[in-house]
Amino acid sequence: MALIWMRIFFIIVCALVGIQLGGVYGTISGADFTLIGMGIGIAGAIIVIILEMFMRRVSVTGLSAAVFGLIFGLIMAVLLSFALNMIPMTETLRSSLRVILMLVFCYLGMIIAMRGKDEFNLVIPYVRLTRQDVGTELIILDTSVIIDGRIADISQTKFIEGKFIIPRFVLKELQQIADSKDSLKRNRGRRGLDILNKIQKNPHIDVRIHEEDFAEPAEVDAKLIKLANVLNAKIFTNDYNLSKVAEIQGIKVLNINELANALKPIVLPGEVLEVKVIKEGKEYNQGIGYLDDGTMIVVENGRHLLGKTVQTTVTSVLQTTAGRMIFTKPANGRKTSK
């Protein structure tokens, strides 16, 4: 509504200016140009408003890059114009070459700057607006960590400090998952939107939506890595492949699965664990159980104990990329229960 009133005010001002100029020219020529001036002012205002409406899709970053490229092109054209003064030629030819150089370099400067606008993070103010205070860390949330849901509880504990950045393309991917025809994907997407809403309502968490997108690359993971480079931010994810690719490119990664594994209780060989054997293992005569935190317990010679809770003795612990596995054997003399 405010924009509409501003446009109306702009049209009125342009009409008044047109009337004023029409009166000035009418005094000089002896004719009445008041109405003509008002019409030209209103028409000019409408044309400007139409151009403004077409420029809605132009981002602040793109506009800043274009202005920077234009200035750079003008500087290069002026420097080369000085060089032309050293070459003997007619003034007409020199003036023509100056105009050509200015047009060419301004165009090239704007195009190059627009193509590489994501790299101008030091000269485009918008990219750094969320980084006024250097001590504040920027953390970009991945789609997978939002759907996972544990980010809400971790943020509530205040173990992680910083501003959470949610890119617009991550929100778009989350919405596509929520609108999926697959019921499982649809439920996961809606869960992610609920978790995101919960995080935003938390007064202790600073969440920002980053509007900028990249035409290339098309993959969300690659966009996350590129945005982390531009903003000098960390990536919060539970995607193993994304974590490794980001680390290779020198980006700091907060992997929620690694955090969960680090918080699991440490067990040593010889300790006694109580576990319910719920299924057969892959190897011969093995039984499988789980601790409350999801850690897999492999019970050697435990196949005959299916459905029973048994006291077991830890023999070894294996750390894998998927998590921690504890190998045990039934404790001698321990009772089992159904």
Image (cartoon, rainbow, N blue to C red):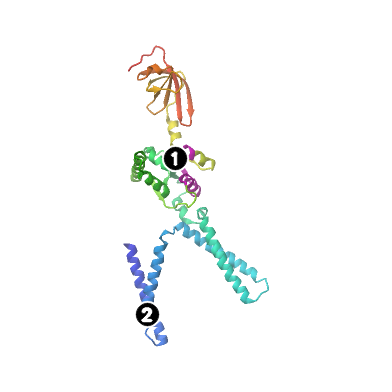
Kindly report which numbered mark, 2 or 1, lies closer to the viewer in this rendering: 2
Q: Residue 137, can we see it?
A: no
Q: Amino acid at mark 1?
A: Thr
Q: Position of residue 286 (x, y in %)?
A: 43, 20
Q: How many marks?
A: 2
Secondary structure at badge 1 equals strand
- In the picture as drawn, the residue positioned furthest to the left comes out as 1
Q: Position of residue 230 (x, y in %)?
A: 50, 50
Q: As displayed, is residue 148 above or below residue 17?
A: above
Mark 2 neighbour class, 10 Å CA radius: few under 14, some 14 to 19, many 20 or more: some
Q: Answer with the quarter of the image where residue 77 lies.
A: bottom right
Q: As displayed, is residue 47 above or below residue 130?
A: below
Earlier in the chain: of badge 2 and badge 1, it is: 2
Main SS category, magenta section: helix
Mark 1 neighbour class, 10 Å CA radius: few under 14, some 14 to 19, many 20 or more: many
Task: Give the labeled residue for mark 1.
Answer: 237
- Spatial distance from mark 2 to mark 1, Cα to Cα? 63 Å
Residue located at (44% from left, 40% from top): 237
Residue located at (50% from left, 53% from top): 118
Secondary structure at badge 2 equals helix
Q: Position of residue 192 (x, y in %)?
A: 36, 42
Q: Residue 109, can we see it?
A: yes
Residue located at (62% from left, 73% from top): 94
Q: Report the span colored magenta.
A: 219-242
- Determine whether, in the image, residue 264 is placed left or right of residue 201: right
Task: Give the labeled residue for mark 2.
Answer: 36
Q: Position of residue 137 (x, y in %)?
A: 45, 45
